[in-house]
Image (cartoon, grey):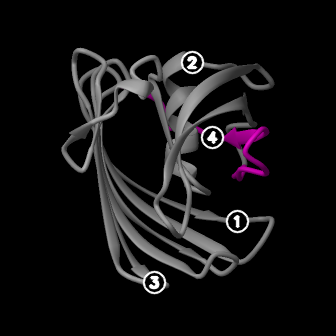
Amino acid sequence: MKLAFFWQRLDSPGLEQAEVELGHQLALTASGSLLHADTGSSLRYRMQVDSHGRLGHAHIDISAPEGRQLTLQHTETGRWLVNGLPQADWDACQEFDLQNCGLTNALPIRRLRLAEGDSVELNMLFVRLPNLQAALCPQRYRAGCPTRTAAPATATNRRATAPKSR
């Protein structure tokens, strides 16, 4: 099943558009674009999520303020590869978040099947915009109301509505 999502930031001007194809269990493939006035960022992303709801591969291509790319891969053995190079310091991290990206905010909520109002703190591989620097970052996620659009507020207080798995 193919779905289209649109998010509008509430804290500053910004938009996200994503096309998501749901696969078996929690698997999905997605492509999208982000425009953020506060960071001057304009980017496109592609990602694949495995049947357990965890990121397998992501490619981020930022065109503004200056062009750069980042490729992340999370192997079946739990190793993170950044542009093909292993990052052993990140092996304990199971989650991925692209700054101000509604889709990546929805992934752990969908995987953990958080009910409205439930929350959890997770250690995220957080990719900052516009420099595409990745670092480990603890973040608290809370499931929002599924009947309205909810946008992330801060790095420690995330709300999102996740697409349901098949």
Q: Which of 53 and 41 is in front in this view?
A: 41
Residue neighbourhood size for the residue with mark 2, other residues' Cα within 10 Å, grouped as few (<14), some (14–19), many (≥20): some
Residue 9: assigned label: 1
Q: Is residue 107 visible?
A: yes
Q: In the rendered view, does 125 fall on the left or right side of 70?
A: right
Which x, y percent locates residue 105?
A: 58, 42
Q: Residue beneath label 3, please?
A: 64
Question: Sequence order check: which comes first, mark 4 or mark 2?
Answer: 2
Q: In this view, does 75 lie above or below 33?
A: above
Q: Residue at x 71, y 78 (%)?
A: 13
Q: In the rendered view, does 159 fall on the left or right side of 71?
A: right
Marks 4/2: CA–CA distance: 11 Å
Q: In the rendered view, does 31 fall on the left or right side of 120?
A: left
Marks 3/1: CA–CA distance: 18 Å
Q: Residue beneath label 2, please?
A: 113
Residue neighbourhood size for the residue with mark 4, other residues' Cα within 10 Å, grouped as few (<14), some (14–19), many (≥20): many
Question: Sequence order check: which comes first, mark 4 or mark 3?
Answer: 3
User: What amino acid type should be assigned to the residue bearing mark 1?
Assistant: Arg
Does the magenta-highlighted stretch encompass residue 41? Answer: no
Residue neighbourhood size for the residue with mark 3, other residues' Cα within 10 Å, grouped as few (<14), some (14–19), many (≥20): some
